[in-house]
Image (cartoon, rainbow, N blue to C red):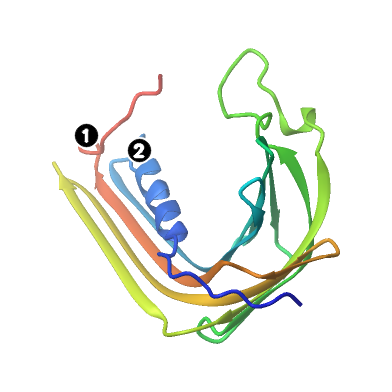
Amino acid sequence: MRERKTQKNVPMYLLSVLCAMAILFATTSGALALDYKQMFRQEGFSAWATWTEGSPDDYTETFLNVTKTNAGTDVYISIYADSGGTISTLTGYLYTTDKILITNGKLKRAVLSPVTVELYDSSVVPEPIPGPKPMLMEDITPIRTITIEAEWTGIGKAAKNSYRYHDNNGGFIAKYRSTSLHRQADVTGFLDDQDLGWADYGGMVSFRDASMQMGDYGTIPIVDAK
């Protein structure tokens, strides 16, 4: 095991809040019902870590994020490398309903079981741009396939955050509420047979989001597709 690094104090990402906000605004358009009402609730857990190694001339940064909700678990990993000015970025994503992330207590501990993820060159991963023949993921060959596993142990005190949003626009009402609990963490991990050692940054967050949109026909904002 490598020498443990002193973790830097950096703000945690509110990934869950941003995702829920995106869902809120995406669902407030295009409704055509007289008594329209839509509700959305989600709760879950997210853990992330960043490992860095090397020198300015030969540098590697590995980022891992795992998010678990009632629907399943998402795993995202990116590996950025700069070797003498030659830069490459590999990214991979996995969704599964298998129980690969085990959590314990209020952000005390989390364990990601070994999972296999295909990595792609981010410079050729297709963007969601419409066209006569859009590129599909099946058209791209993975650069490599890796196995990643990690363990988080909470350190310090957990911090609670909350956010509320309310809008009443001509009879259309939109409400959003989010509460989250954040805690920094010591993180260790393995990528294939490589011991990543202690992460430079790491944290865990549990979240609970709820949104509601309601209104009558004629008051609900409609966004034309172009």
Query: Is residue 183 placed above or below 96 in the rendered structure?
Result: below
Q: Residue at x 68, y 77 (%)?
A: 3
* Spot occupied by residue 44 in the image (x, y as percentages of width and height): 52, 68
- Decide which of 114, 176 is in the foreground and name it: 114
* Spot occupied by residue 146 in the image (x, y as percentages of width and height): 81, 54
Q: Residue furthest right?
A: 193
Read off the residue under disc 1. Answer: 218
The local crowd at label 1, few if under 14, some if 14 to 19, many if 20 or more residues have their Cα within 10 Å, is some
Q: Which residue lies furthest to the top in this view?
A: 132
- Is residue 53 at least partly visible in the picture? yes
Q: Label 2 sits on what residue type?
A: Ala
* Spot occupied by residue 13 in the image (x, y as percentages of width and height): 44, 60
Q: In this view, does 91 lie to the left or right of 157?
A: right
Instruction: Classify the position of the N terminus by image quarter.
Output: bottom right
- Is residue 68 at least partly visible in the picture? no
Q: Label 1 sits on what residue type?
A: Gly
Instruction: Classify the position of the C terminus by image quarter.
Output: top left
Q: Is residue 182 left or right of residue 93?
A: left
Q: How many labels does the image show?
A: 2
Disc 2 from disc 1: Cα separation:
10 Å
State the mark number for residue 31: 2
Image quadrant assignment for residue 186: bottom right
* Spot occupied by residue 38 in the image (x, y as percentages of width and height): 36, 52
Image quadrant assignment for residue 200: bottom right
Q: Which residue is drawn at 80% across and 38% down?
A: 142
- Label 2, secondary structure: give it: loop
Q: Is residue 72 left or right of residue 165?
A: right
Query: Is residue 118 placed above or below 188 in the rendered structure?
Result: above
The local crowd at label 2, few if under 14, some if 14 to 19, many if 20 or more residues have their Cα within 10 Å, is some
